[in-house]
C-alpha cells in the first residue's frame, strides 16, 4: 500500500505546481504589505498618594544631611483599544 501511494503523492505535487505558477505569471502586483501587530492602547492617570518632603537625617559620623524625597504616585490604567493586527504597505521592486 505504501509503495502504491508514494508515486501518486509525487505526481500530484508535480501536476499542481505548474498550474499555480501559470496563474501567478498572469497576475500583476498591485502592492506589497506586511503584517504588523499593534499593541493595546491604555489611558494612564496618575493619582498622588504622598507629597514630596524634606527630612534631616543624622549620620553616625556626626554629619547632618537634608534629604529630599519625591512624591509617590499610583497609576490607574484604562484600556482604550485592544491589541490588533494591521496590514502596512511596504516598498517593493
Image (spheres, rainbow, N blue to C red):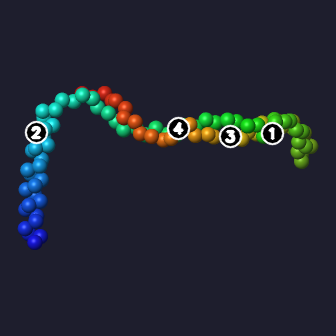
Verify CB contact (< 8 Å) between mark 1 and mark 2.
no
Residue under the point 8% across and 69% down: 3
Q: Earlier in the sequence, mark 3 or mark 1?
A: 1
How many neighbours does mark 2 have within 10 angstroms: few (below 14), some (14-19), or many (20 or more)? few
Instruction: Quote the CA–CA distance across marks 3 and 2.
Output: 58 Å
Say which element carries label 4.
Answer: strand
Q: Which mark is residue 22?
A: 2
Instruction: Quote the CA–CA distance across marks 3 and 1.
Output: 13 Å
Q: Earlier in the sequence, mark 3 or mark 2?
A: 2
Vertical order, 28 against 13 (above or below)? above
Say which element carries label 3.
Answer: strand
Q: Which mark is residue 34?
A: none
Mark 1, residue position: 50
Can residue 39 be seen here? The reply is yes
Q: Earlier in the sequence, mark 4 or mark 3?
A: 3
Quarter assignment of residue 46:
top right
Verify CB contact (< 8 Å) between mark 3 and mark 1.
no
Disc 4 versus disc 3: nearer the observer: 4
Amino acid at each position: 500500500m505504501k509503495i502504491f501511494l508514494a508515486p501518486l503523492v509525487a505526481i500530484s505535487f508535480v501536476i499542481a505546481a505548474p498550474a499555480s505558477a501559470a496563474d501567478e505569471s498572469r497576475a500583476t502586483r498591485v502592492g506589497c504589505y506586511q503584517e504588523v501587530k499593534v499593541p493595546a492602547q491604555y489611558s494612564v492617570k496618575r493619582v498622588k498618594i504622598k507629597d514630596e518632603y524634606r527630612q534631616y537625617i543624622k549620620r553616625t559620623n556626626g554629619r547632618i544631611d537634608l534629604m529630599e524625597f519625591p512624591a509617590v504616585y499610583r497609576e490607574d490604567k484604562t484600556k482604550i483599544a485592544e491589541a490588533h493586527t494591521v496590514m502596512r504597505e511596504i516598498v517593493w521592486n
